[in-house]
Structures are given as structure tokens and as C-alpha cells.
Amino acid sequence: MIPVLVYDKNQCDPKKCTAKRMLKFGLAKEVKSLSAIPNGSIVLSPFAEKALSPDDIRYARHGLVVMDLTWTNIDDFPRPRNTNDRALPYLLASNPINWGRPMELNSAEAVMASLIIMGEREQADSFMGRFNWAPEFMRLNGNLLDDYSRAKDSSEIIRIQNEYIESIRKG
């Protein structure tokens, strides 16, 4: 089981906040400060130079951290020290706010995708009954997530992503 951690900047509507729901349902624990994030953990970041891959499971055992803030405030993204920043590869959002938009996942979608990519499907399945968009997320991204979960490292994730994006362009 991967420890899922949430650093919440309290920028979203609490009624719609998936990070708060993850905390409420025991799917994650909150970290109150950047210094409380365990050294060596994975921090999901849209600014990371490396893509998350199954190879990152060794770091995720320290913690998988999602920074909960709105996409409109993404420039204020926190950067904790002594962690491993990783970006998620191409995926489509299924939440009602960003449905169908590539790369604009909410916190729970990001965690669920990360768990699947790293081979923790059983833990990811615990999100299915808690978020009504989760089945749609799997419908939109399931095959791609399966491909990502079979990759050996970040460079292979990027190759799979690029091939997929190219296939969309050629349509």
C-alpha cells in the first residue's frame, strides 16, 4: 500500500474538492507543511522533467504526494525539497469541471492514475465507489493506463504518450 499524502492549499470549493474527499474517506492523509513531506517521496508536479513510471514505486513507498491547488493558481505550485518530482503522462480528465481536457486532472484522478501506473491497481480501485466520475475516468483512459503500467521507465512512458498523441493527430 502506497501512503497517499495531500498538501492542501485550500483554494477549491470544499464541496467539490477531491482532496478533501480523499481525506474524508481515508484514501489519503494530510500533510500540513512542506517540511512534513517525507524525504524521497514522489510529488506529482506538472513542472517535473520526468514522467511517473512503474519504476518509481520504490520512491512512492515513502509517499505519493498530491499538491491540491486550482489550475488557475498553478504558477504558485509548491516545490518541496528532497523529493522526486514526477509528471503524469497524457490522460483525459473525467471530472465534471474539466471533462475531456487533457492533462487537467483533479487530485483524486491524479492519484488514481499514479497508483495504476505504478501497479497498485487494487489501491486505485478503492477510488471507484467514492467518486462518481471514476468509472468514466477508466473508460476514457483505461487502455492508455494499462500501456503506461507496462512501461519500464520514464522514457518508455514518454514514447507511449507521444505515439498515442500522434495517433490522435492522424485520426
Image (cartoon, rainbow, N blue to C red):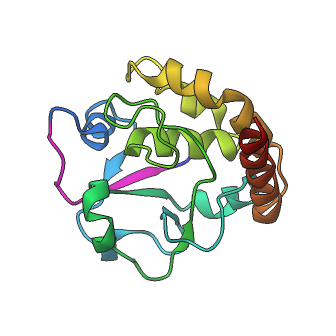
- Segment colored magenta: 3-14
Q: Position of residue 134 (x, y in %)?
A: 47, 24
Above or below, 136 relative to 141: above
Residue at left offset 29%, top offset 60% = 31
Q: Quadrant of residue 167?
A: top right
Residue at left offset 52%, top offset 44% = 102
Examine the structure image and report whether residue 10 is included in the region drawn in magenta: yes
Residue 41 can be seen, yes or no:
yes
Q: Position of residue 145 (x, y in %)?
A: 69, 37
Q: How many marks?
A: 0
Q: Position of residue 10 (x, y in %)?
A: 16, 54
Residue 69 can be seen, yes or no:
no
Residue at left offset 28%, top offset 73% = 76
Residue at left offset 54%, top offset 38% = 92
Q: Nearer the viewer, residue 49 or 53?
A: 49
Q: Residue furthest front?
A: 170
Q: Position of residue 141 (x, y in %)?
A: 63, 32
Above or below, 123 relative to 44: above
Q: Quadrant of residue 95?
A: top left
Q: Residue furthest bottom?
A: 81
- In the image, taking residue 55 as reference, residue 15 lies left or right, namely left
- In the image, taking residue 60 as reference, residue 160 lies left or right, namely right
Split into 4 quadrants, where in the image is the N terminus?
top right
Split into 4 quadrants, where in the image is the C terminus?
top right
- In the image, taking residue 57 as reference, residue 91 lies left or right, namely left
